[in-house]
Image: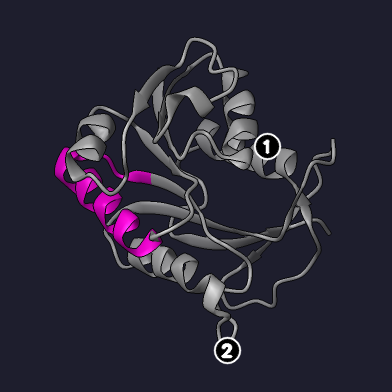
Amino acid sequence: MKKVIIIGASGSLATVVIEELKKQNEVELTLFARNKNRISNPGDANIIEGDTNNYDDLKNSIAGQDIVYVNLAGNLDGMSKNIIKAMQETGVKRIIAISSIGIFDTPIKPALKPYRALSDNIENSDLDYTILRPDWFTNANEINYVLTRKGEPEIGQAISRKSIAAFVGELVKNPGEYIGENLGISKP
């Protein structure tokens, strides 16, 4: 059984990722959100109401997990540092994190600076990471994506949440794949 915690579980992308991971019988989900009442259709997942700015909330929630999936907005520099520290102190190594397309553009748009901080913090850790840099999200009912590696030109267009969730599902099924990768993900 793989234990997966979703940090930021009430977000629009996380909701679709939760549905995708619920299809995997060997996954035990823990959903971490500031307001547990905003999590829709949690199924039999463990639900934790907590704050990513509160280190103790994170550490207690991450302990015993196999994979940490991060899907946040806001003070991503501070939150990602807390997550990394909690993972290091509890011995959890595998992290999948959502950043944003455009974080390596020069000059970087101010709105993307927090996503770049999250990416830099995770890349500079000793964790087994996969960072995803999606294009804008759509609600299209399709799974169709292309990946670009860091340093390659980002290609494609707005991508369905379902496509991102499908790729995250593959990473959870095969946690040894795409380690140390910072990937753009877009619709071709």
Is 77 covered by the magenta stretch?
Answer: yes
Query: Residue at the top extreme?
Result: 44
Q: Please, is residue 119 above or below residue 176 in the view?
A: below
Quadrant in which the N terminus is drawn:
top left
Question: Is residue 150 left or right of 8 when viewed as pictured?
Answer: right
In front of the other: 52 or 170: 52
Q: Position of residue 97 (x, y in %)?
A: 47, 51
Q: Please, is residue 160 above or below residue 174 in the view?
A: below
Q: Position of residue 164 (x, y in %)?
A: 67, 45
State the predominant SS element of the stretch in magenta.
helix
Q: Earlier in the sequence, mark 2 or mark 1?
A: 2
Question: Is residue 85 left or right of 9 when viewed as pictured?
Answer: left
Q: Label for residue 80?
A: none
Q: Which amino acid lies under the numbered mark 2 shown in the image of this protein?
A: Thr
C-beta proximity under 8 Å, tags 2 and 1: no
How many labels were placed on the picture?
Answer: 2
Which residue is identified by label 1? 166
Which residue is identified by label 2? 106
Is 31 covered by the magenta stretch?
Answer: no
Q: Magenta segment, which residues?
A: 76-94
Q: Quadrant of residue 134?
A: bottom right
